Image (cartoon, rainbow, N blue to C red):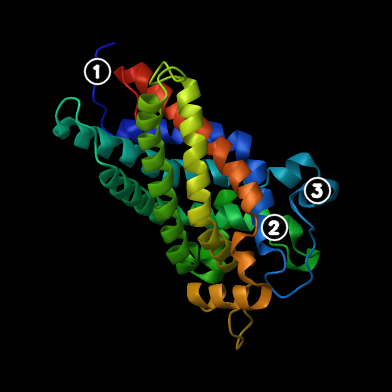
Amino acid sequence: MADTSLGLGMRMVLGATGGMGAAVCCHPLDVVRVQLQIDGGSGGAKAYKGTGDAVVQIVKRNGVLRGLYPGIDAAFLRQWTYGSCRLGIYAFLLDKVTSTQGKGVPVPFWKKLLMGSTAGAIGSFVGTPSEIALVRMGADSKLPEAEKRNYKNVVDCCLRIAREEGVAKLWNGATPTIIRATLLSASVLACYSEAKIELYKALPTVFKDKEGVPLMFTATMFASLVANVVSNPFDVVKSRIQNMPVPAVGEKPLYTGMGDCFTKSVKGEGPLVLYKGFTPAFVKLAPYTCISLILVDKMTKLVTGKSAM
């Protein structure tokens, strides 16, 4: 097939589709990650000893589907908001910049970082309401019966938050969410694009096809590790802010903002709290990144004759 340039809209659709495929496989890990990150965050006793213990307790308490797949509709909505923007905008910008570089001239790594940051920031702002719903619905099963919100689905969750807590609450924790997404997208997307090029040049006998699955898989694993190290502290702060209880009339909120949450968490639980949930976050991010980016690359190649990233 001859090379064809795709518009932003089509690239966003491909990005969302790839993200949904990854979400089906990785959603349970996201549920475990959120529950680990909020565990002990309100000053209560910690319920989980680790990732394995969290999985066992969640399944024992709520079963596989209700325990590990709450909020899957929110995860799908997140792909049509955050995921479509993040992957679609990056692929669109990379294609445009590549076309201006001259034949055979690679796009500088710093430009890829800038494009990844831009795509992540825009996608995160658009997708914050679905992120709030995803966190709330994923954490609801851990709350005591009297405190459970019992959201019916993602639409019910978003409408109730807006009605009961105000529309602004749909963007609660937007600052750490956007910072995290900016860092995550810059790390994942730029490192993935760059790693594919460098690995192909450095190990041509190992990676014989520059658009083959083995090369894509290796590049996504490297990009996922870098991204997880960079973004996990912001992920912990984001999850705690988004899931903190609504204060009673006259009471101060548990956290007044990103800095306050960061300070209280480190002071109360030590600096390693910022890497709480690192294992399930990486175990979730790595396959999610692998599945979503390979799907987007392969679907784009079918349509245009060349990979997206």
Q: Position of residue 303 (x, y in %)?
A: 33, 19
Closer-to-camera residue (124/191): 191
Residue named by callout 3: 62
Image quadrant where one finds the N terminus: top left
User: Can residue 125 be seen in this snapshot?
Assistant: yes
Label 3, label 2: how many angstroms apart (C-alpha)?
16 Å
Look at 39% across and 33% down and name the residue there.
13
Label 3 residue SS:
helix
Label 1, label 2: how many angstroms apart (C-alpha)?
46 Å
Considering only order in the chain, which callout, 3 or 1, is on the residue closer to the N terminus?
1
User: Can residue 257 be seen in this snapshot?
Assistant: no
- Tell me the amino acid under the disc marked 1: Asp
Image quadrant where one finds the C terminus: top left
Residue 196 appears left or right of 255: left
Look at 41% across and 47% down and name the residue there.
187
Labels 3 and 2 touching (C-beta < 8 A): no
> Farthest residue in the top direction?
1
Q: Position of residue 238 (x, y in %)?
A: 53, 63
Say which mark, if any, is on residue 36. Answer: 2
